[in-house]
Image: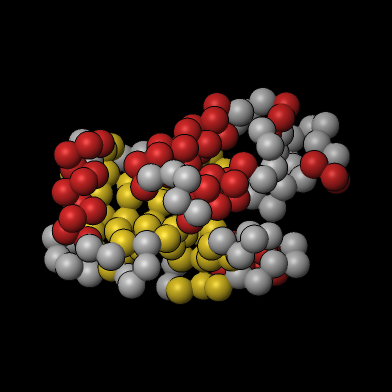
Amino acid sequence: MHAGLPEQIVDDFQQGRLSRRQLVSRLMGLGAALATFKGTAWAQSADEPGADDASRATFQATGLDHIALDVTDVGHSRDFYQRHLGLRVIRGTGDDSSFMGADRDFFLTLFRADMPKLNHYCYAIEHYDPADAVERLTAAGLQPRRTDNRVYFPDPDGLTVQVAGG
């Protein structure tokens, strides 16, 4: 998998080369691909025998947990995702936010904003603890931000990544 693929997908969306539907679909596919590699040599955990120092990851992602989008009209976007992707409202039927899902494994969050863009995307990780996540990210030289039990950090292009329990 190309290291810059998530960034390229988001850049394509921000440049208007992808629709919101295509953005969600491609990021979901990326998460599914990552989950497929779980337990393989490619995604070997740092705790497993044979994992060398260079291949030790800060976390082991188990899949894409959710994607959050900033949208100009939450109701219009909510209708779009219900009609075209069959997502149902989990919570939030107002004008400021809506949480939508198709099953227990993934959800989409819509936040009202002046400009449409990717707000953040979140990977599920094993053995999630927010204090530990902040410590690991700081040790890795990143700049995590914690809000309650949510931990966010920037990727190399400044996109916001979140980690959560898997």
Q: Is residue 41 above or below residue 27?
A: above
Nearer to me, 63 or 47: 63
Colouring convention used in this rendered image of the protein:
secondary structure
Nearer to me, 18 or 27: 18
Q: Position of residue 58 (x, y in %)?
A: 69, 53
Q: Is residue 15 above or below residue 5?
A: below
Q: Is residue 35 visible?
A: no
For residue 81, side relative to residue 54 (left or right) = left
For residue 115, side relative to residue 151 (left or right) = left
Q: Is residue 33 above or below residue 106?
A: above
Nearer to me, 102 or 119: 119
Q: Residue at x 31, y 62 (%)?
A: 71
Q: Quadrant of residue 98?
A: bottom left
For residue 53, side relative to residue 106 (left or right) = right
Q: Is residue 71 above or below residue 9?
A: below
Which residue is the extreme one toward the right? 53
Which residue is the extreme one toward the left? 93
Q: Residue at x 42, y 60 (%)?
A: 117
Q: Position of residue 106 (x, y in %)?
A: 36, 42
Which quadrant does the N terminus fall into?
top right
Q: Residue at x 33, y 47 (%)?
A: 107
Q: Position of residue 122 (x, y in %)?
A: 48, 53
Q: Position of residue 101 (x, y in %)?
A: 27, 44
Q: Quadrant of residue 50?
A: top right
